[in-house]
Image (cartoon, helix red, strand yellow):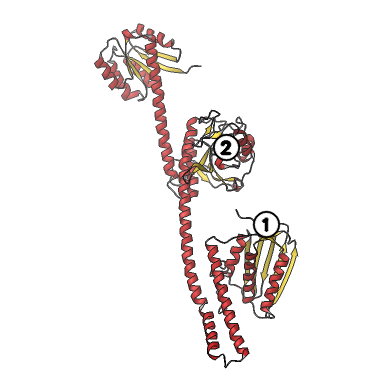
Amino acid sequence: MLDTWKLLIVDDCVADRKIYRRFLLRDPHLSYQILEVDCAEDGLALCQEMHFDVILLDLCLPDMNGLELLDRLNQEVLDTATPVIILTGRGDEEVAVQAMKRGALDYLIKQQLKPDVLQLSVRNAIKQLGLQAQLSKTQERQRLIATTALRIRQSLDLEQILNTAVVEVQQLLKCDRVMVYQFAPDLSGKIVASSAESGNVALGDRPDIEGLVYQRVPSHLEDRIQNICYQERAEKENENWELGETGKKLNVKGQEDESSLIPFSFCPIPNPQSLIPGKRAISYVYEAGLSNCYDTPTAQFHTKAHLVVPINLSNNGNLTPKPWGLLIAYQDSGEQQWQSDDVEMLYEVSVQLAIAIQQAELLAQTQAALQKEKQLNTFKSQIIGTVSHECRTPLTSILVAASTLVKHSQQLDESKQHRFMQIIEQKARYMSKLVDNMLLVNQFELDKAKFKPIPLDLLQFFFELVEQERETVGDRHELIFESTGNNQGFWGDRGLLQQIFANLMSNAIKYSPKGSRVEFHLIGNDSEVMFYVKDRGIGIPLADQKNLFQSFCRGSNVDTIPGTGLGLAIAKACVELHGGNITLSSQVGQGTTVTVSLPKRFTTN
């Protein structure tokens, strides 16, 4: 069925109007609704009442000149895109030039008029009208996209960028809801921003977006959504499709296809690098045969019509971009068929959103690097301070003992010589342990510590460690070791576990009075093991407890008890490499309990 175009003929000659009508109604390509008037005033009045796609205007009218009417139409009525064709009985080039300058699209001489000439002129006028309308629409779309992009990129905070984006896109597309879905490293994902209608609340200083507000994503939407349908569908599609360099799908002839692009759903991507999408719209998902993929995440919104485009980040100069997530527009009210302009606008906004996301991530990385550098500088200062303070006393003891042995060894009996040698050995071991701890903490600070899990018999492992501690402390403390539950099947790093245990036991013994009890309990179940060290020592003030797992932090009540404040920091870092957790509870004067829980099997990414 042909489109019908509304056309107005302004001519005082009935016979001429009849000829024009007859010629146009014979046009096999277009259909017309034709209205006629015989004077300029009636033509002007009719144009004020209704819109016409094309106007045929006689140059000589009884009440005014055709060019004068053209001027009035341009000033008072016509959209600048409405084409006007001048008709005249005399071929005057000067008049033709004047008509063109005043906005006429064409100039036809009545005596030379033939059906195909008039038909072609009107068809060209309508074609020009369409091109002008498309240009205006494109310009307006680009203006809206530029405005939207500017607002999205005003911030470098990722959360604010996403929240602004969903509100702006909702306003741009006039839809019910917009969401941003982010892929996770494990190829699942979650909704990280959502817009919704909410009374008459405006966002920030945007009074023009009345009735819209971004909402924090409900907890039931934050759960990661896993589904294999995307992978199954992608495998079927890839039988006949491959990707072009631009990321668009290629048809079986190897040509880029603009109309059939990768359908998206809330499903993990099995291989994001091999499924980089182009511009894609699913206007009515149930007709597209993808309902199984969309049902779970969209059922709560009772929506079927949604539009999905990818958010792709540049990939360090690689031609294949990095999939970051999806930008999704929903239409809850009715089964909306999205227009191609909607797809283009959403896609172009997704490009601007990707740029803003990348800028925010770069800023966050820079800030993290600066913070890390600041922490490292602080750490270096603390190392220097600790070395100068903690090494001074043992070095002094070593020097005094060594000097005494050198100068007076002949006057000293064997027991005193042995005592001085013990002092030298003890202080040297202390300094060696201090250096080892600082090197270990430095590895943790630089993220260079290695985790090498092996199967361990925990009961035997900890029994041997406790026996070593008993030999060291002698009868100064009572060490209790108890084990319950299932401790089989554990994988861990032997060296890191020794660091955890050694530091926790050392602290428990060091801060407990002579003769007191120190307990070590090992408890296991099917999935994890837990052990805790409990002492009855001086305890830790509540105000100090929150910082104790940081390097060089100690309780304010340690008085003259030696220590560097590295033990708990090392223990925490070793626990985290195992994927576990460490907690502390303490009361001043009553003792401290440190609890460690570790999964039986943990592998780093």
Rendered position, 51 above or below 221:
above
Residue nearest the observer in this picture, 125 or 185: 185
Q: Where is residue 45 in the image (x, y as percent from the top left)?
A: 35, 19
Rendered position, 56 above or below 510:
above
- Is residue 53 visible in the rendered image? The answer is no
Q: Label 1 sits on what residue type?
A: Arg
Marks 2 & 1, CB-CB < 8 Å contact: no
Q: In which quarter of the image is residue 94?
A: top left
Which residue position holds label 2?
264
Residue nearest the observer in this picture, 482 or 218: 482
**Residue at (48% x, 57% y) in the render:** 368
**Residue at (56% x, 40% y) in the render:** 274
Which residue position holds label 1?
601
> How many marks on residues?
2
Q: Is 323 placed left or right of 462 in the picture?
A: left
Q: Residue furthest right?
A: 485
Q: Label 2 sits on what residue type?
A: Phe
Q: Is 457 placed left or right of 416 in the picture?
A: right
Q: In which quarter of the image is residue 269?
A: top right
User: Which element is circle 2 on?
Assistant: loop
Q: Where is residue 157 in the image (x, y as percent from the top left)?
A: 47, 50
Rendered position, 106 above or below 582:
above
**Residue at (49% x, 37% y) in the render:** 245
Q: Position of residue 78 (x, y in %)?
A: 35, 23
Q: Which residue lies furthest to the bottom in this view?
A: 411
Q: Distance between the residues labelled 2 and 1?
A: 35 Å
